[in-house]
Amino acid sequence: MAAEESEHMQLIHRWLAGEVVNSVVGINVVGGPLNGRTKIVQLGSDGAPPAQLRTSGGRAGPDHHIYAAVCSTAAPAGWIYSHVGIDPTPTD
């Protein structure tokens, strides 16, 4: 079991380092309440991450925050999620 966990953790570390493995990669989040975190996402057939990330609850508070995928040569994955603002359309 320890070997499996080790392999799994190695995969997670590769994603967090910005390496694309099986069309999955970790993308840095910039701005807003999730600033400095990494979101692990599935890339589309065009190699791009989902265009938008929407968060809510937890440490982000009750508001829903919107992040947009932006190309970035400074990011290991080539993309970042940049904070756009609070979603004015509540879903609750």
Image: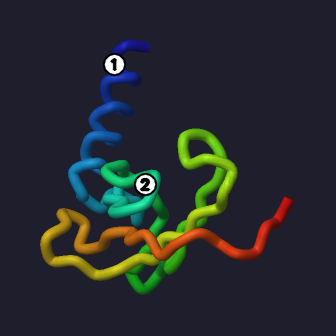
Q: Residues within 10 Å of mark 1 (few under 14, many from 20)?
A: few
Q: Amino acid at mark 1?
A: Ala
Q: Position of residue 73 (x, y in %)?
A: 15, 77
Q: In the rendered view, tell whether residue 61 sits above or below residue 43.
A: above
Disc ID at residue 57: none
Q: Residue at x 31, y 51 (%)?
A: 36
Disc ID at residue 39: 2
Snapshot quadrant of residue 9: top left
Q: Is residue 66 left or right of residue 43?
A: right
Q: In the rendered view, tell whether residue 86 sits above or below residue 47.
A: above
Of label 2 and label 1, which has the lower sequence position?
Answer: 1
* Position of the C terminus by quadrant: bottom right
Disc ID at residue 3: 1
* Position of the N terminus by quadrant: top left
Q: Position of residue 47 (x, y in %)?
A: 38, 79
Q: Position of residue 41 (x, y in %)?
A: 46, 60
Q: Residues within 10 Å of mark 2 (few under 14, many from 20)?
A: some
Could you say whether the residue bearing mark 1 is in a helix, strand or loop?
A: helix
